[in-house]
Image (tube, rainbow, N blue to C red):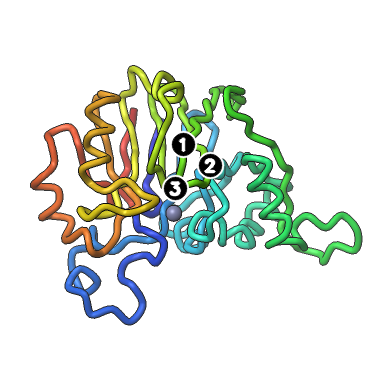
Amino acid sequence: MKIYFLGTGTSQGIPVIGSNHPVCKSLDIRDKRLRVSVWLSWDEFSFVIDCGPDFRQQMLVSNCQSIDGILYTHEHSDHTAGLDDIRPFNFRQGEIPIYAHQRVIENLKRRFDYVFQTENRYPGSPSVTCREVVNNFPFPVGNKVAIPINVYHGSLQVFGYRIDDFAYLTDVKTIEDSEINKLKGLKVLVVNALREEPHKTHFNLEEALQFIALIQPEKAYLTHISHVFGFHDDIQKQLPENVFLAYDNLEINI
Ligand SMILES: [Zn+2]
């Protein structure tokens, strides 16, 4: 499986509009971060997790040619606002399946009502088929199985996903023991680490490292990063040897 980091930034992206923060002015390409998303591909299959406001640019830069489905983590705009830009895929492939918690599907129906309209649809509107994700009910993705991992972003429920020995968790602040059992034996864990200072709804660096130490994946990659965390190079130097700061367009294979 190829894992391609389409975006690794927190909700505003880096650089932040109008910011003079040194990280926003950095010339290191690894300090430019679009909104979080990841592209998974294997055999003839291709799935993305989340579809945020940078989706169009991410699809162009990564040269993604087809999508067999979008797995949503939760409804926040940095994870969902790009839905309108799936149209080029619709024109080539037809409807795209979207996988999400029922609450997230209802939220998308309100925010993108024209996508879900069944009568008098405007020609060329995005088209999706909804697949509800329910915790403890793994579902097929191509010739593999995705296992939902139930986590909390403050009080908001969020799904992470495990496919084979890869797991992607973003916007986590807390996780129950029953879910931790689903994360044994991972080769690669991707998890959010916003910054060094604590945050009400996101793991900070210390919490992410404690979580990684608990899960013990072979390798871990940090994502959903704020500009206040610091420069890529400086952060990477402080990390344990099996923990890496992800960056946009990083590609790994497992
Ligand atoms: Zn987010």
Instruction: Tell me which label, 2 or 1, sits earlier in the chain.
Output: 1
Q: Amino acid at mark 3?
A: Gly
Disc 1 is placed on an element classified as strand
User: If the image is split into quadrants, where does the C terminus sit?
Assistant: top left
- The residue at which mark 3 appears reads as 154
User: Is mark 2 in CB contact (under 8 Å) with mark 3?
Assistant: no
- C-alpha gap between disc 1 and disc 3: 9 Å
Q: Which mark is residue 130?
A: none
Q: On the image, numbered disc 1 is attached to which residue?
A: 151
**Three-letter amino acid code of the residue under disc 2:** Gln
Q: Secondary structure at mark 3?
A: loop
Which residue is at a point 37% across and 58% down the rendered structure image? Answer: 10
Q: CA distance from mark 2 to mark 3?
A: 8 Å
Q: Which mark is residue 157?
A: 2
Looking at the rendered structure, the kind of residue marked 1 is Val
> Residue 42 in the image: x percent, y percent?
47, 31
Q: Quadrant of residue 16?
A: bottom left
> How much space separates mark 2 and mark 1, taking CA atoms?
6 Å
Relative height, residue 229 to residue 40 (above, below): below
**In terms of depth relative to the viewer, which is nearer, 201 or 26?**
201
Q: Check mark 2 vs ligand 1: CB closer than 8 Å? yes or no.
A: no
